Amino acid sequence: MPEPDRHDRELDAWVLAAVAELDVDGLKLGLGARELPVPGVAERAGLDERVVGVVADRLAQRGLVRLLDHADPARVVLTPAGRRAAADTPKPARAPAPDGSRFVFLRPAAPQGPAAPDDEQVCDFHPKRRRKGVLDDGGEHCDGSGWIVDPATRESRPCRCRPLRIARNRDRRLGGRITTEILNYGLASSLHPELHPALVPVVARWTADVDAQLDAGRGLWMTVAGWDRRVAADALDEDARPPRTQAEFEAAAARAGRLLDADALTDQRHREQASRAGGELSLMEVRKVAETAAGSSAAAIARAAHHAGRGVALYSLSSLYRSLVHLSRHGGYRERLDALRTADLVVLVGLDHQVLRRAAPWQRDWLSEQLELIAIGRYEHLKSTVIVSTGWPLEHLQEALSPETFHRLACAAGEPLPARRPPAATPSPAATVT
Ligand SMILES: [Zn+2]
C-alpha cells in the first residue's frame, strides 16, 4: 500500500478528529451509543458525505474505526487504536479541501459478484442430474468443468454441457430472466384483442420469425395512453441510492470485497440479494405487464426469443432501477451494463411517464443516464430493443425522460407507436346496471 500523501493524511486526520469528538460527545451525553452515522460525521467534519465514506474506509483499513456499512446509513465506531491515534495526531487547523480530481465521476470496474451456484459444479449430463422419465443415454459427461479430458492423449474437448453453461452464464450476466410466468403469459395473450390493428401484423412478424428481426437489429416501441393503465403505476424504490462519484464507487467496491471475503451473507439474504441483483419481475409485476395489449405482446416477443435460444432479458423500469442500483453498490454493475448493451434482445416494460415524473430528480437523472448508456450501446451494436411505455401524446414521455434520453431510446427501438385501439364509446352507466 503506498504511503498516503499529504492530501490524504490531512483528510484522514480531520475525519478521525470529527469521529473522536462525536464519540466524546456521546459519552458526555451518556448515550452509550458509539455507532456514529456517516452523515453525522460528515456534518461535523464539514465535508461531503461521499468523501467521508471513502476516508472512513481508509481509516477502517488502518484499524482506527470499524465501519458498519450494512447499516443504513452506514455507521462508524471508533476503535481503541483510533482513540489513541486521534489523541496523538494534531488536528489540522481547518478543514482540508478535498482534491476534486480524486473524486470525479468515473466508473472503475466493480468487483465480481458471488460465485456460481453449486449446481453449476455438476455436469448437466451427469446421471444424478437426470430427471425422472428422461432416458439415460449413457453418454459421457464431464466432471463439472465443461471439458472432457482424454486420459491417454491429455487433450481436452468441450463436453455436451458446454453450450448450456455458456448460455447460462450469458443469462446470468444479463439478468431480467424470462421466467415461467412470462412464458405463460406470452403464450396465453399474444395478439391481445385490444392491440392496435396496425400493430397486429408487426407483432405477428416478431413472434413468427424472431431470428430475422433480431439479426436485423430491428426495434419496436409501443406506447399507450394513460387510460390503458388498469392498475396503479408502481414507483421506483426510494431507499435504493446509486453511488455517484468515484469515491462512492470505490467505497462500494471495497464493501463488496469485504462482503465476499467475510462470507457474511446468510442464505436468505443471499437469495434476496440475488433476486434484487437479477432484476427479475415478481409474479405481480408480470401479471400487470400482461394485462395490457402492449405488455402481452412484449411478453410474447420475449418468449419467442427465449425459445429461439437468444440472449434476452425482460426488465420493468423499476426492476432495472432496482437491479442496477444494487449492482452498483455491491459489485457487478459494469458487467451487467455491458450485457444490457450487447444482448440480442432487451425488452423494457413499464416505462411510465408518471413514475418518472414522481421520482426524485436525482433518481430520474441517474436512471436517464443508465437508459442512455444502454440505448447508445444497443444502437451501436445493432441490437434489438423492445419498449413498452405509458405516455401519450409523446410529449409526455419526452418531458418525463428528457428529450435527449427519449431520442436515444428512439434510436434503439424506433419511434413509439400507439399500441392500443382507442376505447370504444363508454356505455352509459344506465345501460350497465342490471
Ligand atoms: Zn459436462
Image (cartoon, rainbow, N blue to C red):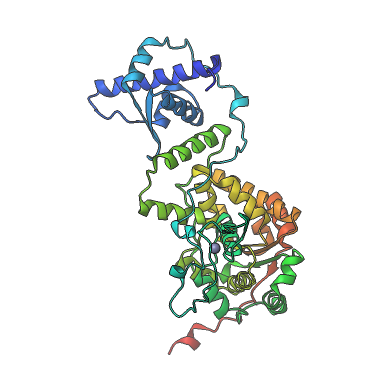
Which residue is at 54% across, 14% downward?
A: 6
Q: In which quarter of the image is residue 83?
A: top left
Which residue is at 25% across, 22% downward?
A: 27
Q: Which residue lies furthest to the front in this view?
A: 152
Would residue 258 be found to the left or right of residue 104 on screen? left
Would residue 374 be found to the left or right of residue 230 on screen? right
Position above or below: 278 against 36 = below
Q: Position of residue 181 (x, y in %)?
A: 50, 72
Q: Where is residue 182 in the image (x, y as percent from the top left)?
A: 53, 71
Q: In which quarter of the image is residue 421?
A: bottom right
The one of 48 and 390 positioned closer to us in this rendering: 48
Q: Position of residue 266 (x, y in %)?
A: 35, 49
Would residue 94 be found to the left or right of residue 414 on screen? left
Q: Position of residue 240 (x, y in %)?
A: 47, 47
Would residue 197 be found to the left or right of residue 105 on screen? right
Q: In which quarter of the image is ligand 1?
A: bottom right
Position above or below: 72 against 146 = above
